Amino acid sequence: MIGFTLRAAIGLIKGSDGSKVETVNLPMTKNHWFILVAVLLLLGGLGVALMLALALGFFAGHEEATGGGVGLPIYTTAQSASAHAGYFHNSLTGGGEVYVNDYEEAGLQLTLSEPQTVIGLMGSISPAKVGAVPGQPVTAYVMADCGSEMPAYVPYRNLKQPPFDWRTATFRELTARQQYNFGPLVTTTNAALIAEVVRLLRDGTPVELNPFPFAGTTNLTTLNLTSDQLPGMLFCPSLCYYGNGTIYLAESLMTDFTVTPPQVRARWIPASPLLTEWLKTP
């Protein structure tokens, strides 16, 4: 018999007249010890299971927040100088495919700010998403996060996919901001005006404008052209409201990082009277 004893619960109770009730000492047998050990093991197992459940819940929530998932391919990126001055050649490799973002994609913008379908991840510690572009097969275009602190997605074209040719594309809608980025948004489906924008970009005579600072410039915005040949994206040539009231447009912007601070340049073309009137009419 083991020398340890348990004091019966009645030993903690006083009589109705305040007198103590006699306590009883119960001996701890081997069976009692086995029961006690079993209870302690059960409680320990429940604690471990609870900790595992909390850990799994945390990682599952983290996976959902980052768009991760078991089996998604890992994509890698690389950057080099482009064959076009003022641009970078960005490559995205994963899932057995290679995608690029270069001069040909500089004027393209996505219609969604976040992917609805995640097809891969970039990085391992805090993975960024690679997503499908709505209306585009992943063998043509994908979208990838190029941001640092905030998500910022850009389109990447599969090397097997020919570049989008805005010169021969058919556009059905044009939108723009009047008076820089803070003006009202105007929209038109005027085929003559849309054709005028394409003609200017293709055949217009460029002029030399002083470069703009890379950061903090407020007089630059874009024209947004919609084409059924480019689902999930827009062709967005740059638009400049110059200080003297003249409006210029360019296929895309070039960034010069060889100077401090970095500057933005472009092949600026003066807007025609038809385009200028549309952009200035309230």
Image (cartoon, helix red, strand yellow):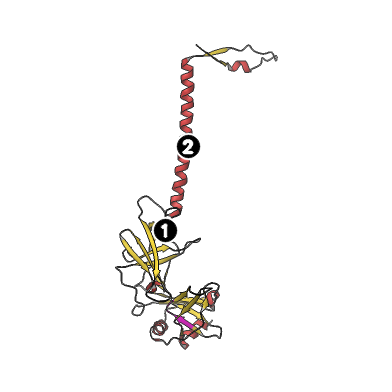
95 shown above or below 59: below
Q: Which residue is mark 2?
A: 50
Q: Is residue 232 magenta?
A: no
The disc at residue 129 is 1
268 shown above or below 41: below
Task: Find the magenta span and give its range.
Answer: 248-252
Give the main secondary structure, helix, strand or loop, of the magenta stretch: strand
Q: Residues within 10 Å of mark 1 (few under 14, many from 20)?
A: many
Q: Residues within 10 Å of mark 2 (few under 14, many from 20)?
A: few
The answer to whether residue 133 shows anywhere in this view is no
Q: Position of residue 62 (x, y in %)?
A: 46, 50
236 shown above or below 31: below
Q: Position of residue 232 (x, y in %)?
A: 39, 67
How far is disc 1 from disc 2 in space, using C-alphas?
A: 31 Å
In front of the other: 48 or 184? 48
Q: Residue at x 41, y 62 (%)?
A: 144
Q: Quadrant of the C terminus?
A: bottom right
Residue 59 shown left or right of residue 20 in the figure: left
Frontmost of labels 1 and 2 is 1
Q: State the SS at label 1.
A: strand
Task: Give the mark nearer the N terminus: 1 vs 2.
Answer: 2
Q: Splitting the image into 4 quarters, where does residue 200 fall?
A: bottom left
Tell me which amino acid carries mark 2: Leu
